[in-house]
Image: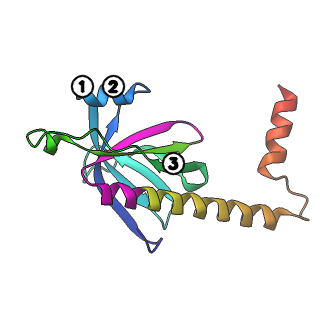
Amino acid sequence: RATRCGVYSAWLKKSKSEHARAKWLTGDKNTRYFTIDFDSQLFFYAHSKENKKISAPISFQDILGAERLPPPAKATKRGKQNQSCGFLLRTKERVFELHTNSNGDAAQWVFALNAARDMGLAALSKAQAGLEGTGALTSSEIAQLENQSQ
């Protein structure tokens, strides 16, 4: 994940709704196989490693950022294996609450997702710079025209 090339995948638990934290405590979560593909600049998940059908592919340009969630309350020794480490991924369309089993892994996911966001911003800036002086419209100009026509 630190090299910003290739593919990184792992099983993460995805909360189901905006009431995610309460549902997480009650066990209402999905385990999915999440992938960051630095080469194609996509983030997505699937129901299995082998499954070629992916859900919710997200372009790096649509990632707004990732951040760690506060650590869970201290657990008793018996309940410790049920503890998880969470983080939020904010995109233009939605917010994902994701959980892994270690603080280190959660920190690495946040770092990698923010690196992906930075790659997406750089690609967008490069594309917009290439359009200057060509007479082509930028994405913000297209959005303004769409808003005016509505």
Look at mark 1 in the image and give the residue it sits on. 26
The location of residue 109, given as percent across then percent down, is 40, 57
| Numbered disc 1: secondary structure | loop
Circle on res. 22? 2
Residue type of the residue flagged with mark 1 = Thr
The residue at 33%/25% (across/down) is: 22
The location of residue 115, given as percent across then percent down, is 52, 63
Residue type of the residue flagged with mark 3 = Ile
- Residue 8 location, quadrant: bottom left
The residue at 37%/47% (across/down) is: 45
Q: Residue furthest left?
A: 78
Q: Are marks 1 and 2 in contact (CB under 8 Å)?
A: yes
Q: Is residue 45 magenta?
A: no
Q: Nearer the viewer, residue 79 or 107?
A: 79
Where's the C terminus, which quadrant?
Answer: top right
Magenta span of residues: 92-109
